[in-house]
Image (cartoon, rainbow, N blue to C red):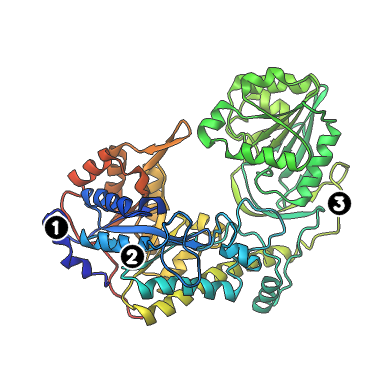
Amino acid sequence: MSRNASLALLPALFALPVAAQTAEHRGLWMTSASYATPEKAEATVARAAAAHLNALYPIVWSSGQTWFKCSLVPMAENVTPGFDPLENLIRVAHASGLQVHPWFVNGWCGNIHPGSVADRRPEWLVKPGQPLSATWYDFGQADVRHFETQVMMECLRQYEVDGLHYDYIRFGSQVFCYCDTCLAEFARRTGLPPIEPNQGKFPLWLTTVGNPLAQVTTAQVLATFEDGSPAITLNRLGAGETVLVNWQGARYITPTLNGFVTKLLGHFEVQPGALFQLHTTQTKAKSGSGYQTRATKWLKDLGFDSEMVDETGLSRVPVQGTVLLTHQTRMDEATATRLREFVSGGGHCLFMDGPTNAISFPALQETIGLKAAARMFYGPRLVTPAPGQDLIPSGPAYDVATAPRRIDRWIEYRKDCVTDLVREVREEARKVKPQAPISAAVFFTKAEADGVCQDWYRWLREDLIDYAIPMAYTESNDDLQAALREWQAADPKMERIIPGLGIWTNRNGRDVTRPSAQVLAQIQTCRAAGAHGNLFFQFNCLSDDLVSALAGNPYQQVCLPYFPPARQP
C-alpha cells in the first residue's frame, strides 16, 4: 500500500471529515500483546482511531521471532497456530484508515530461547572482552546484515504494509567485538591493529558511564584516567577505609575490575553476613533498583552474598562490616553523617560511581576524601595504576600514544557496520516497494547516539531512511526544547524528523499514563518548532482520558499522516 493509499479508507473512520489542514503524523508504537489475537487487534485499532491517530507501528521482529509469517524465522510462541497477527492487523487498521509500519528490533537479541535465531547462530552475536547486560547481533558480519535485510524484505514483499521501521538499530555501546571477523575487518578498513581483549590486568580500557568525583583532599589516588583525573581512590578515616571506583563499575563489569574488587573485599576482611548494599531512599526514587539487582548478582558471581538495606538499616551493619554503594548518586545529610561515623569506627565503604548529588555534604567529603563532582562522562576510558600503591598491580604498558586514535577509528568502524545494514535495506526496499517509507527510532541527542554507534544524522544526509523518530521520552519540556534546537540545526524545516514522545511516567515503581495536559503541552512544543507530528510510546498507556484529550484537542479533526517530500532515489 502506498503512503497515500489510506486516503480512500479514511471515511470509514467514524465517518469523520478529513481535516483541511496540512497532513500530520500521529503514530503509536505497539507491543505484540496489543494485536496478538483478533480481539486485541480490534480493540487496539478502535482505541487508536478514537484518539484520531493515523499510523500504527507494531513490533513484528524481536528476540529472534516474528509476528508475521516468515520463512527465515519462527513465529512467536504467544501466537495461536495458524493465526497471522500482522495480516489481521493490517486488514483491521486499513479498514479504519490507519496505516501500518512494522517495527523491527534489529540490534538487541532480547531473550535467547531454544530455536531462536541467536540460539541457532551464536556466532552472529557480539563477542565483547567484558560481560554485557544484554546480547547484541553483530552488524560487523555481512551474514548478519544480509539475514536481517531478508527478514525485512519478506515482510515488505508479502504484506500490504505502509513502510518499514527500525528500532535498536545500533549496538549496546562502543564496546569492542573480538570475533575474528571484526578484528580482521577493522584492520582491513583502517590499516590499524585492533586493541587486544582485556586479560584481567591493568591498565584497563573500557567503555563506560561515570558520575565522577574530583578535587582530592585526603584520599590516596590508586589509579587515574587518561586525563590524570582520579579513577580509583582509597581514603583512610579513623579506623576504617573508603574506596571509590569513579565510574559505574558494577554495571560495566570487566575481568580486571572483578579481580580488583575480589582483592579489595579480601583486604577489607569481609566475613559472611557482613556485606551490605546501601540503597538510599533518594536514589531509589530517582533511578529505581535496577543497578542494585545487577550488583547483587555480580557480587554473588564473585563469591560474596550481600544484604540490601536502606539508610534505616545501616544500624544492622557490624562495626567492621562493609557497605557497597552502587550508583548511589543521592542521599540526605543524615545518611552522609552515619557513613562517616561508620567508617571512622572501623567500617569499610566501597563506592561504585560517585555520589555526585550529595558530595556537597562535609561528612561525605571526609568519608571519601574528595570534595566535588565532575562532569558525567560516557565513552572509552583508560584506567592506569598510580605509582606508590600495591592494591592495583600493573600489567604490561599500554600504548597510550596510538590507543586513542585506534579507539576513535573503532567507533567509526562500528558506526559504519550499522550504516551498512541501513544501506542494504534501502537498496533492497527500492526494488520491492520503492515508495514505501523507511523510518528509524533513534537516540534523541547526537551525543547519546554516538555512544551506541548510531549515526542517524548520516542516514538522513545520505537518504538511507526517509525520516527519523528521536525517542524524546523526557518529561522535561526544557530538555525537549533543547533537543528540538539540535534537530533544527540538522533539519531546519523539520521535514525529516518526527519527535517520539513518551506518554508514561513511573509512579512507585509502576508505569502509569502521564497527565494529559503534560502530553498535550509537549505536542504543542513540537508543533511550535515546526514538527509535522509525533509518535507515542506506547499503546499500553493510551488511557481513556488521554484518548479523549487527544481527540478533543489537538487532534480534533482526522487527517492523513505526514511524510517527508519525495526524494529522488
Residue 86 lies in what quarter of the image?
A: bottom left
Mark 1: which amino acid? Answer: Ala
State which mark lies toward you, 2 or 3.
2
Q: Position of residue 64 (x, y in %)?
A: 53, 62
Mark 3: which amino acid? Answer: Ser
Mark 3 residue crowding within 10 angstroms, few (<14) / some (14–19) / many (20+): some
Q: Is residue 433 left or right of residue 221?
A: left
The mark that comes first in sequence, 2 or 3, is 2
Quadrant placement of the N terminus: bottom left
Asked if residue 122 is positioned above or below residue 236 in the image, the reply reads below
State which mark lies toward you, 1 or 2.
2
The disc label shown at residue 87, or none? 2
The residue at which mark 1 appears reads as 19
Q: Residue at x 12, y 60 (%)?
A: 20
Mark 2, secondary structure of its residue: helix
Mark 2: which amino acid? Answer: Glu
Q: Is residue 209 left or right of residue 501?
A: right
The disc label shown at residue 259, or none? none
Mark 1 residue crowding within 10 angstroms, few (<14) / some (14–19) / many (20+): some
Mark 1, secondary structure of its residue: loop
Q: Position of residue 405 (x, y in %)?
A: 68, 66
Question: What is the CA distance from the residue labelled 1 to the residue labelled 2?
Answer: 28 Å
Question: What is the CA distance from the residue labelled 1 to the residue labelled 3?
Answer: 69 Å
Asked if residue 84 is positioned above or below residue 427 in the image, the reply reads above
The disc label shown at residue 394, or none? 3
Q: Residue at x 42, y 60 (%)?
A: 81
Asked if residue 123 is positioned above or below residue 280 in the image, the reply reads below
- Tell me whether the residue at label 2 lies in contact with that at label 3, contact meaning CB atoms closer than 8 angstroms: no
